Image: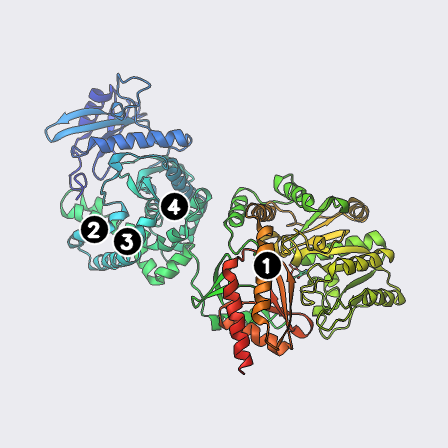
Amino acid sequence: MDRVLAAARPRFDDDAAIDIARRTFDLVAAAAQDLGSERHQAFRLLDATGGPVAILKVSNAAEDPATLDMEALAVLHAHRVDPSLPLALPWLAPGAPAASLDPADRRVIFPADEGDHHVRAYSVLPGRGRIDPIELSDAALAGWGEMAARLGRALRGFFHPAAQRTMLWDVQHAARTRELLGAIRDAQHRYLVTTVLDRFDTSVVPVWPSLRAQVVHTDLTTDNALADAAGNVTGIVDFGDMSHSALLTDLASLLDSLLNGRTGDELFRCARLVIDGYERITPLEPLELRILPELLAARATVTIAISSWRSDRGLEDGTFAERYNAPVARTIETLLDVGWDEAARRLGAAGRVAPSGALAVRREAVLGPAMEALTYDAPIHVVEAHGVWMTGADGRRYLDAYNNVPCVGHGHPRVIEAIARQSRQVNTNLRYLHETAIELAERLLATMPPEAELDTVLFVNSGSEANDVAWRLATTFTGHRGAVCTALAYHGVTDATAALSPESWGASRRPEHVETWEPPDPVRGRHLDGERFAEALARLATRGFPPAATILDGVLTSDGYIDPGQMLANEWREQTRAAGGLWIADEVQGGHGRTGRHMWSFEHLGLIPDLVTLGKPMGNGHPVGAVVTRREIAARFGDETVFFSTFGGNPVSAAAALAVLDVLEDERVLERVTRVGAELLGAIRDSTRGYASVLDVRGVGLAIGVEVVDGETARALKEGLRERGVLIGTSGPGGTVLKIRPPLAFTEAEIPVLVDALTATLESIAAG
Ligand code: PMP
């Protein structure tokens, strides 16, 4: 047991306090008021008119001077770091040099029979003490949370050897309060304390060593702070319980105190406000949020146990000592009522994973029948993904060879941090000047081939929107209304882009202004020249629609990953130009390094586009899109309208997109894609040779298609790979092409995983 905690507080009366003030700090006071304290004595000294003179603190004779050194040094440190923190700074003792850094110069010894009392003096801070937390407004609650975080931040760089102590108020030592159980007279309180301590042992003790730790106040409560009429903190006063502990102990003690008198939903609502305030300064880590209910409850049990024990021992007046036991017991009861996991969720921790089957039913109920169905016969309920690996709710890991959006890998730290940091700083729109979108536009333009003279960027939020805006730019510039796209193209969900998406036309008729052409069929040796394209233009012309634009996904994803080669691509391009149309290079699939050799797939095809549209991989999963074009095209549009997209080019999206560009460079992603893509293509070719169901293996970079005999076989392969833990898709005519399009974080190490799963599935299909 801590020596000080086991000691009675000093018992000087008011006259003695006035005398001590004079003898130690040369203070003249007419009156003294005992402020009440657990182990020390604190007095407010008043002059003859009742005006404040100082606060005098007479420490327990059992107090270790080293602890007092720490206290003084910590407060002075925090004051240096954050001078506007309302801290009570100990006065220099009379006669001490003004520049003294010696903590002993911040107190004066007053000898007495029981031992030396260390006496300190402080200025009287404004505000009231011992405020009732139930009076605090929502704004004040958040303000207290923020103050706690600021204090923790101000102490982050501080250490003192005396901080390594066992102070029972620090919930780190909650388990030790079991020794005090016998002193708790109330049976229900005893039950609550035991229940919490049992939980603490199993859920907090094992993870304690991994919590953020530093020297912390540990005892932030309404008793140790002053507040103004609005309830805002005007003073933090008692640093007597400081120790090296988990940073979270401050928040636990603050919540324990502020939630006093609140129960049920109101307790959680108020707790969230305090936590919001805290997280304005210091975001909590997932582990901290997960164990916060236990820490809060532990602090409440410590309150009950220590106060019961001290009053049982006669060390303090029982009513005063135990005044918080009933309300903190109710806090514990509220937590137990909802259960630990649910309490953590209600305080901000990640929610529990819902049962997959029920979740699928709920999805159907709220998203309805127009929404694309879940992929796979047994849908995957994803709970986590990092790099090229995704984890299902059942704990199973899947190699992601399908998702091109997380292009630099699922959960890339650079992108996550860029989003989080920018969100914390400011998120706004392009009506205000801000660096990120401008820099992003400059960086994107610098990646475009100079001969294309692409010099203007319009920011939007998705690939569909980028194509939609590109389409408006093209029709405005050319005055034409016709469009040409590949036979199975997909370019988006908006009215204009759905018209350019024969893949999703379904039963509805082809729009009158759109014509499609068949790209080459390498397996059957068809459509190898520019004939099909010329016919499409001719059909459009017959209907009176000269082309405004041809739109092409440079890796022809939905057509089954066809590489037409530079000659044919340029023939399409020339025919479009001759008919007065512009070229839209849709880089939503093929851009951001997918082809490996080039940043953009139109470069792979040797094309010079008029408009380039970006989406999907651009933000690694964060929704962001862009149109890149020439000034004359943008200017014509500008003559007719004003372009503004609320979220387009917002600082957070732009920061995400900048982070993606950085990672592409820093990790030399394109080089890796070229190398790994070629190796993967070769490995698939080698391993599928001899299977009659495989007709062709083709692709560029990490956009690889495996054409098989029919859609049924492709589907069976996709399902079989999923059963073997590898995710791919299908596309192409009749869904006959396996779509292998992993995040660009894919490396050589994953090749055998994919190839083995593919051959095992082919083998099992061949065996019937
Ligand atoms: N263009 C292409 C080539 C696409 O593949 C897609 C999406 N699959 C889009 C545009 C539309 O992008 P989004 O879904 O982000 O609107």
Disc with the residue nearer the chain's start (4 vs 1): 4
The Cα atoms of the two marked residues, 3 and 1, are separated by 47 Å
Disc 2 residue type? Thr
Question: Helix, strand or loop at disc 1?
Answer: helix
Cα distance, mark 4 to mark 1?
65 Å
The image shows a total of numbered marks equal to 4
Dot 1, how many residues are within 10 Å of its Cα: few (below 14), some (14-19), or many (20+)?
Answer: many
- Residue at mark 4 to residue at mark 3: CA–CA distance: 35 Å
Crowding around mark 2 (Cα neighbors within 10 Å: few <14, some 14 to 19, many 20+) is many
Q: Earlier in the sequence, mark 3 or mark 1?
A: 3
Which mark lies nearer to you, 4 or 3? 3
User: Looking at the image, is mark 2 or mark 3 nearer the viewer?
Assistant: 3
Q: Which residue is mark 2?
A: 177
According to the picture, the residue beneath numbered tag 1 turns out to be 677
Q: Amino acid at mark 1?
A: Gly
Numbered label attached to residue 205: 3
Give percent across and percent down for residue 68.
24, 31
Give the quarter of the image for residue 589.
bottom right
Q: Quadrant of the N terminus?
A: top left
Tell me if residue 628 comes above or below residue 468 in the rendering: above
The Cα–Cα distance between marks 2 and 3, rounded to whole angstroms, is: 14 Å
- Which of label 4 and label 1 is nearer to you? 1
**Would you call the spot at circle 4 few (<14 residues within 10 Å), some (14-19), or many (20 or more)?**
few
Residue 93: quarter of image: top left
